[in-house]
Amino acid sequence: MPRRGRHQSTDKEGAETLSRLEQIEGVTAVIIGRSRGGKSITRTTSTGTFKLQSQVQSGFKGILQTSRGIQEIYIQVTGNRDNVAARIKKALSD
């Protein structure tokens, strides 16, 4: 699946996380949004960590921890959002 959005690059760990998101059943697109340098999800967060933040009309918004800060991520989904959210959390909890 090609990257879409204004910003299309991330670091190595972030790219691995985005690839895992794209492979989840029900996810139709992963769009990279704005980057915010110097920020982190939590003090103990490692690079490549993803956190779902909110549900929007056709998917979810979340943030991805990178080596330089955080990136906003939009995930477009089809089907039951609760099931897709559970699959996302399960796939990224490993």
Image (spheres, rainbow, N blue to C red):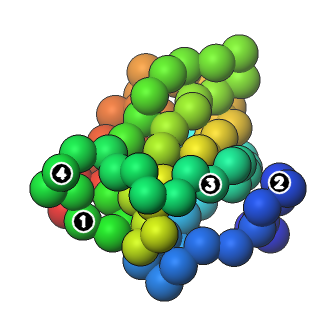
Q: Residue at x 70, y 48 (%)?
A: 33
Q: Residue at x 43, y 21 (%)?
A: 82
Q: Which mark is residue 43?
A: 4
Please report whichever mark, 2 or 3, sits nearer to the chain's N-terminal start. Answer: 2
Residue type marked 1: Ser
Q: Residue at x 57, y 30 (%)?
A: 60
Q: CA distance from mark 1 to mark 3?
A: 16 Å
Q: Secondary structure at mark 3?
A: strand
Please report whichever mark, 3 or 4, sits nearer to the chain's N-terminal start. Answer: 3
Q: Is residue 9 left or right of residue 80?
A: right
Q: Position of residue 27 (x, y in %)?
A: 61, 45
- Nearer the viewer's eye, disc 1 or disc 3? 3
- Nearer the viewer's eye, disc 1 or disc 2? 1
State the residue position of label 2: 5
Q: CA distance from mark 1 to mark 2?
A: 24 Å
Quarter holding the C terminus? Answer: bottom left
Q: Residues within 10 Å of mark 1 (few under 14, many from 20)?
A: some
Residue type marked 4: Arg
Q: Residue at x 57, y 33 (%)?
A: 61
Instruction: Count the labels in the image.
Output: 4
Residue type marked 2: Gly
Q: CA distance from mark 3 to mark 4?
A: 18 Å
Q: Is residue 19 left or right of residue 75?
A: left
Q: Residues within 10 Å of mark 4 (few under 14, many from 20)?
A: few
